[in-house]
Amino acid sequence: MALVGGDPKRLVVLVDGVAIQAFGCARDVGSGELKRLQQSIRSGALDLVVVLARFVGHSMCDSVREECRRASVRCRLLPCGASGVVKHLRALVEG
């Protein structure tokens, strides 16, 4: 599972035994982060991509959603900030 948005150093989370890869948004960590995420999606390394919509620009969000669609990877947008992430991630992992 990947979590996209904000500062990836602050987003490393473990939810119910599921390791989550964190990817920052381009404005925070540079455009290479989007390329790294797209490669992970294409390679089949991810089964779910969760985008923190509050921290990701429209163009990056659209690129991620399109890449997920092409690779048949689930993609979910969360409107919340970092404080609501764990609650939402637990719900996604469980259901």
Image (tube, rainbow, N blue to C red):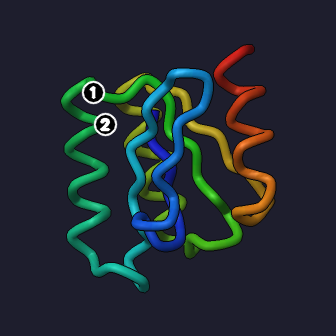
Q: State yes or no: discs 1 and 2 in contact (Cβ < 8 Å).
A: yes
Q: Spot the residue most to the top.
A: 95
Of badges 1 and 2, nearer the viewer stands: 1
The span from disc 1 to disc 2 (Cα, nearest Å) is: 6 Å
Instruction: Estimate the x, y position of residue 83 in percent, counting from the top left.
Output: 78, 61
User: Residue drawn 72% across and 29% down?
Assistant: 90
How packed mark 1 is, by other alpha carbons closer than 10 Å (few <14, some 14-19, many 20 or more), is: few
Q: What element carries label 1?
A: loop
Query: Disc 2 designates what residue?
Result: 41
Q: In this view, does 11 lie above or below 41?
A: below
User: Residue drawn 71% across and 15% down?
Assistant: 94
Q: Which mark is residue 45?
A: 1
Instruction: Estimate the x, y position of residue 65 in percent, counting from the top left.
Output: 51, 47
Instruction: Estimate the x, y position of residue 36 in percent, counting from the top left.
Output: 22, 55
Quadrant of the rendering where the N terminus is positioned: top left
How packed mark 2 is, by other alpha carbons closer than 10 Å (few <14, some 14-19, many 20 or more), is: many
Quadrant of the rendering where the C terminus is positioned: top right
Q: Residue 20 carries which label?
A: none
Q: In the displayed structure, does residue 81 sit left or right of residue 50?
A: right
Disc 2 residue type (three-letter): Ile
Q: Is residue 58 above or below residue 19?
A: below
Q: Is mark 2 on a helix, strand or loop?
A: helix
Q: Which of 90 and 57 is in front in this view?
A: 90
Q: Give the number of marks.
A: 2
User: Residue drawn 75% across and 65% down?
Assistant: 81
Instruction: Estimate the x, y position of residue 47 in percent, counting from the top left.
Output: 43, 23
Disc 1 residue type (three-letter): Ala
Q: In the displayed structure, does residue 11 sit left or right of residue 95?
A: left
User: Residue drawn 53% across and 45% down?
Assistant: 13
